[in-house]
Amino acid sequence: MKEEEGVVIKLEAAAGTATVKVGRHDECSACGACAGSRQLTVEAVNGLGAAVGQRVKFSMQEEQMLKGAFVVFLLPLILAGVGGIIGWQLGYGGEAEDLYPLGLGFLGFCLGSGVVKWYDRRTAARQKEQPVITEIIS
């Protein structure tokens, strides 16, 4: 389990979750690719009843982080590569030899992006895969 600290900025009473603003941490220091690399927000299960403005500790399973990183970053690229290879095989020697790999690679990338969207919705609906507030600091 990986633990982080942050400040509760919003509560969702119906879902039993809290939006926690987290400062930049070690995993973000070299990347900075996302808009939230300086201030990241996380939806965490609020079993302790933290209020807006309170500083909290929350934990998340490292396995879920790795799985999410694979789905978001690598899966679309892998599917684009597979689509490009299949397109190259189908279009080899034809008139539109270059269009098949390009078209099927793009289709594979779009399919991978759809899987990312599906995975995001599925993960958001399952509380056991979400971060959990473990301690109210102040």
Image (cartoon, rainbow, N blue to C red):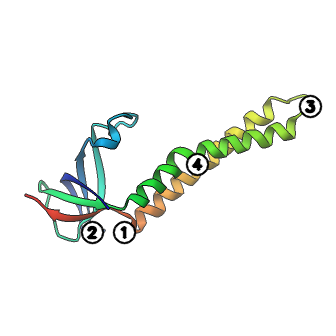
Going by the numbered disc 4, the residue's amino acid type is: Leu
Residue 59 lies, in percent from the top left, at: 28, 61
**Does the residue at mark 2 contact the one at mark 1 (Cβ under 8 Å)?**
yes
Q: Earlier in the sequence, mark 1 or mark 3?
A: 3
Residue 79 lies, in percent from the top left, at: 66, 46
Provide the residue designation for mark 2: 16
Residue 96 lies, in percent from the top left, at: 86, 29
**Does the residue at mark 1 contact the one at mark 4 (Cβ under 8 Å)?**
no
Q: How packed is label 4: few (under 14 Cα within 10 Å), some, or many (20 or more)?
A: some
Q: How packed is label 1: few (under 14 Cα within 10 Å), some, or many (20 or more)?
A: some
Q: Earlier in the sequence, mark 3 or mark 4?
A: 4
**Does the residue at mark 1 contact the one at mark 3 (Cβ under 8 Å)?**
no
Q: How packed is label 3: few (under 14 Cα within 10 Å), some, or many (20 or more)?
A: few
Provide the residue designation for mark 3: 93
Provide the residue designation for mark 4: 75
Going by the numbered disc 3, the residue's amino acid type is: Gly
Return the residue nearer the eye: 42 or 74.
74
Provide the residue designation for mark 1: 127
Eye-nearest disc, 2 or 3: 3
How far apart in space, not on screen, are marks 4 and 2 (Cα)?
Answer: 31 Å
Dot 3: element:
loop
Give the mark count: 4
Image quarter of residue 102:
top right
Dot 4: element:
helix
Q: Is residue 15 above or below residue 54?
A: below
How far apart in space, not on screen, are marks 3 and 4 (Cα)?
Answer: 29 Å
Going by the numbered disc 2, the residue's amino acid type is: Gly
Dot 2: element:
loop
